[in-house]
Image: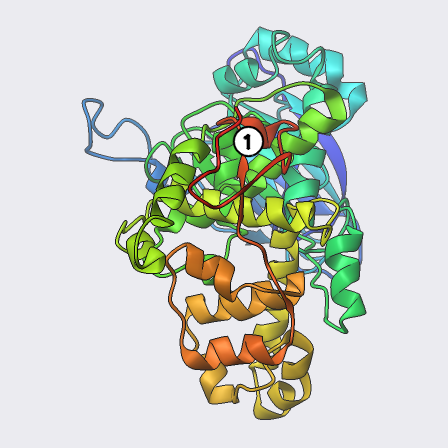
Amino acid sequence: FDNVPLVTKTIALESKRHFRSAGIYALPGKTIKVTRLDSNEVATSIAFNTLRSGATHEFSGNDGYARPKFLTSVTYPVKPGETIYLTSAYGGTLQVHFDTNDIDVELRFENVAQHPIWRSEEDNDSFVAQLEEGNFDWAELITPGFEVHSKLEKMQESVSPARWNKPQDMALVTERYVHNLPHALAGFEGPGIDVIDEVQQYAKNQGWQVETIDIVKHMNADQANCGYGCSGNPYDAYWSFDPLGHGDLHELGHGLEKSLFRFSGWEGHSTTNYYSYYSKSRYYQETGKTSACQGLDFKGQFEVLKQSRLEADPNAYMAGQNQANWSWGARIYIQMMMLAQEQGILTTGWHLLGRLHTIEREFNRSAKSEELWNAGKGSIGFSDYTLEEAKAISSDDWQLIAISYVTQRDMRAYLDMWGFSFENKAKQQVGSLSLTAMPLKYFASENTGYCLDDFAKYPLDVDVSAVWPL
């Protein structure tokens, strides 16, 4: 940092939980001066860096204790009109933490430096130029709902001309396919999140509460807290950020998935990747461009299902397959989504997941008290359950009822086809809804077709005479 000038910057921010980047850098050992210029009522504090301590793997591998473990500082409150002085031996990016949203805060930082920052299209040229100069070890790309805190060389790769014409292009894709669409699919409303008629409006029509999410999420392109990428907010990874990368959307999905959407024995990643697949499919529909998509062996799964129809007890045969890996479960859910679309229940089958998110939240809200449960259980299809029974329900029984309710189809025979078993009470609850049975169909698809436009196009009846068309 020998040739890096020190500057004074006045930064205006709208408060968002839990923190936002100030967009400036503190040099190691240089005391900075922070003055709060506004007088608004929001607890505001300053911190150095965004890194989780677990992302420093001290005494492991060949490098040993290669860097400090506690690079992210505690937060230092700064009250309206107050000036504080801070010094860090490590230096790093400066972050502003808040306890509430949507309050204007103005801060003057003195004796700081300006590292590569992208906030708007006005920064396109200067951001690229600063990345090329390489005077700092960190760079940040800041959008309203998602911020990328990246080691310099990783950001250089992220925004390289081979990927994007200019940084703004990556930022716009980040806002839409990392912030907007995954949270819309998870049934949330909030700033920058589309309202989907078949999800949020559907829930409102049922009299359910639609939850708002209004926080900034973050990624550290640095080292992973666990594995090669590790979920959280921030999530962290060894790779360079890519708004359409499966790794980034996968880690984001960990913060959205629900364990209640897993059938018995399914492993954790069974419910993680739908948000990634949805963003990728929407990106293809909206731009005609492809992004790397995981391959799923739909044909292989269909052959197992087809074989079961030759057995004396198809349900027992499927249960005996003991298929609990994430890919098996993901394919079953995608098949249900395709079927919901083909049956005309939804214009976009992915929105089945959004409906499940909204009914899951309404179920949990209603289960907070006897009064709430008795008032609300009929609106979510659980009218025959007491509060105690609802709290003890298995994920299998819950899904049988919830999927039947949000599709308005009797899912008993369909889910029996997959080898699942349910308690009599759950089956009787579905029976009491007097719904049309969901047909036993499977959809042919290329291994990555569901990320493109190969969705719900090739229905097959599940019987021994069916021939795979692809």
Provide the secondary structure element on which disc 1 rests. Answer: strand
Three-letter amino acid code at the position of disc 1: His
Residue drawn at x 64%, y 75% as measured from the top left: 434
According to the picture, the residue beneath numbered tag 1 turns out to be: 149
Relative to 361, is 344 above or below?
above
Relative to 243, is 427 above or below?
below
Q: Position of residue 431 (x, y in %)?
A: 57, 77
| In this rendering, position of residue 394 left or right of residue 324 | right
Q: Position of residue 456 (x, y in %)?
A: 63, 38
Relative to the observer, which residue lies in front, 164 or 267? Answer: 267
Relative to the observer, which residue lies in front, 193 or 427? Answer: 427
| In this rendering, position of residue 143 left or right of residue 322 | right
Q: Position of residue 406 (x, y in %)?
A: 65, 64
- Asked whether residue 88 is in view, the answer is no
Q: Position of residue 262 (x, y in %)?
A: 43, 57
Classify residue 147 by image quadrant.
top right
